Image: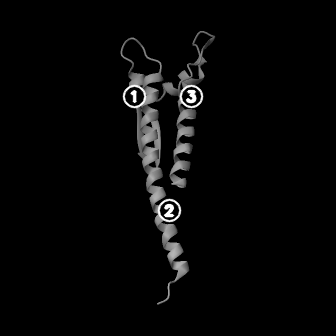
Amino acid sequence: MSINVSSFITQTLANYANGVGEEIEKIAEKIAKEGAQQLRERSPKRPSGGAYAKGWRAKKVGTQWVIHNANNYQLTHLLEKGHAKVNGGRVDPRVHIAPVEDEVVNEFIQEVEGAIRG
């Protein structure tokens, strides 16, 4: 009885890759949902209800997870970067997206490295 070593190695690597791929997908979903929750908590809120802050969602688009604001997507850039006023001057930026993005990216990298290491 002869064992085909190359076939065995190929099958073992394919099983490992499938397992790691599934784990990475779970990690991506979890972190995207956590990121949306963090943005809900950290976003600027008006006393009249805070629709902007409540609008953050995590959504799967193709094979990727995306965090977006479903209620007022137009405000994200204006609030994050600031903008010009109608009668001159500028509105100061209210940075709230960039810190969450940095945290989410770093957490994703750490968890994926952990999944790869097993």
Q: Residue furthest right?
A: 89
Mark closest to the chain's N terminus, 2 or 1:
2
Mark closest to the chain's N terminus, 1 or 3:
1
The label nearer to you, 3 versus 2, is: 2
Per the image, the residue denoted by label 2 is 17
Residue 107: x %, y % from top left: 53, 39
Per the image, the residue denoted by label 1 is 55
Asked if residue 98 is positioned above or below residue 11 in the image, the reply reads above
* Residue sitting at x 42%, y 45%: 60
* Residue sitting at x 49%, y 63%: 16
Residue 93: x %, y % from top left: 59, 19
Per the image, the residue denoted by label 3 is 99
Residue 89: x %, y % from top left: 63, 11
What is the distance, in whole Å, between disc 3 and disc 2 at their CAs? Answer: 32 Å
Which amino acid, mark 1?
Answer: Gly
Mark closest to the chain's N terminus, 3 or 2:
2
Q: Residue furthest bottom?
A: 1
Asked if residue 6 is positioned above or below residue 36 in the image, the reply reads below
